[in-house]
Amino acid sequence: YAFGEEEEEEEDKAARALARNSVQPSCRVRVTNLSHDTRDDQLLELFTGTRPPRTVEMLPPSAASITFETREEAVAAVSLTGIELAGSKLTVLMEHEPAPQALAAGEGYGGARAGGGQ
């Protein structure tokens, strides 16, 4: 990194987290089954309807969280489930909905929780 680039990257991460937390979950979708070669700019292009998403955040492994301005845009994005991108068929869910495999396991996006009495 050149001097200052690392600081700018941290500021970008903080700005994305703030943007993600300042919208209703109903405006976010989770995209899963991404190819490891998928880039955020490809998702931005794919999910741009009348206007581009607010944020596209790549999540390991093989997932992304995409934030839209409105719930209607997020709902429209869910219709792209099954579309192929970079050799993989995508699954798109509203972010507050657990993934189908998580439903079977009794989990949500947060994964299994450890600890007792909670």
Image (cartoon, helix red, strand yellow):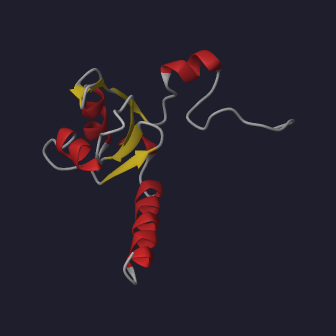
Q: Which residue is more in the foreground, 74 or 110?
A: 110
Q: Which residue is more in the foreground, 74 or 36?
A: 36
Q: How many marks?
A: 0
In the rendering, at what x and y percent does residue 54 appear? 29, 54
Q: Is residue 69 above or below residue 31?
A: below
Image quarter hosting the C terminus: top right
Q: Is residue 40 above or below residue 107?
A: below
Q: Is residue 35 above or below residue 7?
A: above
Residue 81 relative to residue 95: left or right: left
Q: Residue at x 16, y 49 (%)?
A: 51
Q: Residue furthest front?
A: 1
In the rendering, at what x and y percent does residue 56 appear? 33, 50
Q: Residue at x 31, y 39 (%)?
A: 37
In the rendering, at what x and y percent does residue 6 appear? 43, 74
Among the 4 quarters of the image, the one containing residue 117? top right
Q: Is residue 25 above or below residue 92?
A: below
Residue 51 relative to residue 7: left or right: left
Q: Residue furthest bottom?
A: 3
Q: Residue at x 13, y 45 (%)?
A: 50
Q: Residue at x 49, y 35 (%)?
A: 96
In the rendering, at what x and y percent does residue 99 appear? 49, 25
